[in-house]
Each structure stands twice: as C-alpha cells, then as structure tokens.
Image (tube, helix red, strand yellow):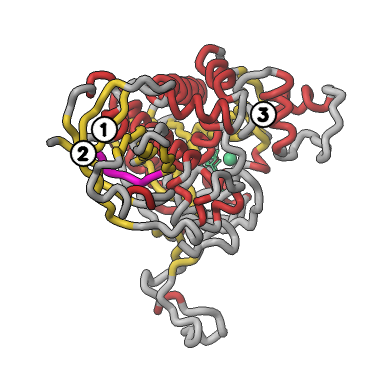
Amino acid sequence: MSKLSIRAARQPDAIGQQATLQGWVRTRRDSKGGFSFLELNDGSCLANIQVIADADLPNYESEIKHLSAGCSVTIIGEIKESGGKGQATEMQAAEVIVHGWSDPEAYPLQKKRHSMEKLREWAHLRPRTNTIGAVMRVRNQICRLIHDFFQENEFLYIQTPIITASDCEGAGEMFRVTTIDPGNVPTKQDGSIDFEQDFFDRPSYLTVSGQLEGEIYATALGKVYTFGPTFRAENSHTSRHLAEFWMIEPEMAFYELEDNMRLAEQFLKRIVNEVRENCQEDIEFFQKRIDDSVEATLDSVASQEFQRLSYTDAIALLENSGEKFEYPISWGADLQAEHERFLTEKHFKSPVILYDYPATIKPFYMRVNDDPKTVRAMDVLVPRVGEIIGGSQREDRLDVLESRMADQGLDAKEYWWYLDLRRFGTVPHSGFGLGLERMVQFVTGMANIRDVIPFPRTPGNAEF
Ligand code: 4AD
Ligand code: MG
C-alpha cells in the first residue's frame, strides 16, 4: 500500500488505488446517516481531501468522533471518485490511526480566521494555516526557478561568506560578530577595544550583501550568482524590511548596465510566468483571499516591457505630476515608497527600471558616468512592493574607484583585494540583488514582508 501525498491523491488518476494518507485534520462533520467526513491536509497542496469514515470502523465511537482541528492521523483506504463540488476524489477510510490529539479548547487555530498579526505570535503554528502554507509553496517554487534560470544561462552558483569584515553597502548597518565577553572587553592603551584579541583578529560582521565576493568570482569565472541570507541592522519598522532576508545576487563579467537591465527583466518575467503555471491553485487563493489584483499584476509583468527611465527624468516627472506627496522630492533625494508607487501603479502601470542615480546617494562601487554627478545604478520598481532589485555596473577603473572610496571615507588599504581586481585584468562588469522576500510579496500580494518568510527577524523579534 503506497503512501500518497494529498496532492497526488486528489488527482483523478489516483481513483481506485488503495493508499495511505497522513496529515492533520482540519474539520470533522458527522452525518446523520452514521458516518463522519474528515477534511485532511498535509501541506502538499492548498486543498484538503475529504475522508469518509463509517460508523462501523472499530474506533468510530471511541476516537474518530472526537477528532478535531489539528489532530494528526494516518488513514488507510481506497481513493474513490467524488460526487462533491471542487474535488475529483475522496477517500473511503478502512482504518484511521490517531497519532496526536489536539485539545479543541486549547488549540489556537481552532477558530477559523486570525489576523496576520496574531498569527505572527504563533510562528510555530502558523504554517498550518492556508495562507502561510500557500506562501511557503510559492516561495519554494521561486527558489527552484531562480536556480533553474541561472543554471540554464550558464551561471555558476557561488557561496559567499556570511561573516565578513567589509561593509558592502557602506551604510554602517551591520550586526557585529564577536566572541568578546561583553563583561570583560579587552582594550588597547588608548582605551579603545582591542579587536586583535577577538576571534577573527579584526572587527567582523554579518554580511549585508555577497556582492564584493561575487565580483571576485565573476572576474575569474565569468557569470556567477550567490543566493543566501543577508543581514541589516537598520531600525526599520516597515512592511518591506527585515533584519534577516535572502538575496539573489548575480554578477557578470563583460556586462554593461544595459545588459544588466535586460537580464533583470528576463529573470523577473521568467519567475512570474512559471509561478503562474506551477502554482495555479495557490495563486487563485491569493487572488480570492489576499489581494484581488494579484493575477492582473502578474499578467501585466509577464506581458509588458519594463519602462526604463533615468533618475533625472523620473524626478522631473514626479515634480510635474501635480501629485501631493507626503515627502517632497527633488534631484539628489532618494525616492520614497510613495514615489515608487506613483510611478509603477499610477503613471506607468508597469514595472519601471530607474537608472543613473546621483553618486551621493549610492555606494562607492558603482561606475561613475561622464557627467560625473551620476553613477550607473539601476533599481527595478514594481507595483505594490516598490524597489525589488538594486544593482549597477561596477566601477572598473582603479583611479576612479580609489577617489570614490576616499570621498566616502573608506580606507583603501582594507579593500586592497577589491582594488586588485582593477589592477589585474579589469573588465566592465555588472550585477544586481533581488530580495527574495520582496519577490514573494510581489507574487502573492501579501501585504507584510513578515508573512512571507518562515521566521521573520525584525527589531525586537527573534524568539523562534
Ligand atoms: O539595493 P540593495 O541594498 O543592493 C545591494 O545590496 C547590492 N549589493 C546588490 C548587488 O548589486 N549585488 O539590496 C538589494 C535588494 C533590494 O532591492 C531589496 O529587494 C532587498 O535587496 N532588500 C531588502 N529586503 C528585505 N529587507 C531589507 N531590509 C532589505 N534591504 C534590501
Ligand atoms: Mg537598494
């Protein structure tokens, strides 16, 4: 007798099979005719399977009639054609084995609907809800598609370090990694902390980005990508920021900014198209229950060309829009969420790639334009989520890079290895970073980024 996932057992070709199903009861309903309906879910798909348990089963009175939401069971029986709406199959139980009870008085998910905020307090139970289950299946698909896309395009998957001494984004938002005992800090003669006595002999941090190390491998192996956790100690309490998030960072030798933009667009389109194909049931759920613009937005991304415009043109457009913004915008300032939303949702009604940003608001590594107040940066903005990708062509000229670092107060000595890439066989190269969680938010329509990662890390939240 084969174990079947509920996903497989719901397919018409399973009809007639003897099978074992295992999962958690969602509901039980007793019929007057002397049998019970159990709705069983195992996470393999959104839908439950209906199980019919007759009163003549030996444990019907003693156990089956006491099953409630959250109880775990193994059910052996036959998959039959179902007359019910929305289901091709159901199971006629021959045996019901109860593994674990779940006291209906105490089980928090007994009640049907809880707010997403409430569910965050139960990070250990929320995966049992339809919403989080659907999010995680979509997230899983996206991760698979990311690898497929890059592998098919001859990128090498490189694992960049999580612990590092360099601040890629230069924003000083890093979590420190140390084995120094806070109650017994070694100091130098001038009273400052003696990091030479720390584990790595120098101040070390959790990485904010794998880019700099990605560049090392791209300038040897051509096209690479990293995909790992990144950490930012920014005190943001928004629906788009996490202190720990996953980033996909491709880095390509011999790519200029236009090549980079083209790749980013292809990449996003591919993910959107294939999620649409592979996760139909879950996407329909998001459309119905979470945000009724999800399907239309996904379709428009898949079919429309992304709008491209320079930062300077975008500022002019925003200034002349006649729109009342909470934060006024002018050349030199970073776009706020409201400006991003105006461009993608109201004005263009499509994803937008902004490029050539002011050098003053972007990190040291971006290639300086001839003007020379702008750099070859690009941000991809999408409806609802705003910035989903940040990237650039990298500064490949040693002298320009050195002077940019000096401008930003960075010590060239500490980046000697990064400068070496420009000393020995420098090449034009580019890359970008896609925030995985923002991608999942975009595809699912989930309003808050804390609900698209299994265990969100935000200021004050790291219990489990
Ligand atoms: O724009 P960012 O900071 O770019 C970089 O880190 C570059 N080094 C990437 C590169 O060129 N290789 O971050 C890239 C993306 C953002 O567009 C956003 O999607 C996501 O990472 N991101 C965050 N996601 C969740 N929470 C945060 N605090 C995030 N910060 C950035
Ligand atoms: Mg950015």
Cα distance between the residues tagged 2 and 1: 7 Å
Cα distance between the residues tagged 2 and 3: 77 Å
Residue occupied by mark 2: 94
**Quarter holding residue 248:** top left
The image shows residue 102, relative to residue 320, as above or below, that is below
**Circles 1 and 3: CB atoms closer than 8 Å:** no
Farthest residue, direction left = 1
**Image coordinates for residue 158, horizontal then vertical, percent:** 31, 42
Q: Nearer the viewer, mark 2 or mark 3?
A: 2
Tell me the magenta residue range.
21-25
The image shows residue 73, relative to residue 10, as above or below, that is below
Cα distance between the residues tagged 1 and 3: 74 Å
Looking at the picture, tell me which residue is in the foreground, 133 or 356. 133
On residue 92, the disc is 1
**Quarter holding residue 26:** top left
Looking at the picture, tell me which residue is in the foreground, 157 or 81. 81
**Image coordinates for residue 311, horizontal then vertical, percent:** 68, 28
Residue occupied by mark 3: 371
Callout 1 amino acid: Gln
**Image coordinates for residue 15, horizontal then vertical, percent:** 23, 22
Q: Residue visible at 43% across and 42% down?
A: 27
Callout 3 amino acid: Asp
Image quadrant containing the N terminus:
top left
On residue 275, the disc is none
Q: Nearer the viewer, mark 1 or mark 3?
A: 1
Magenta span main SS = strand
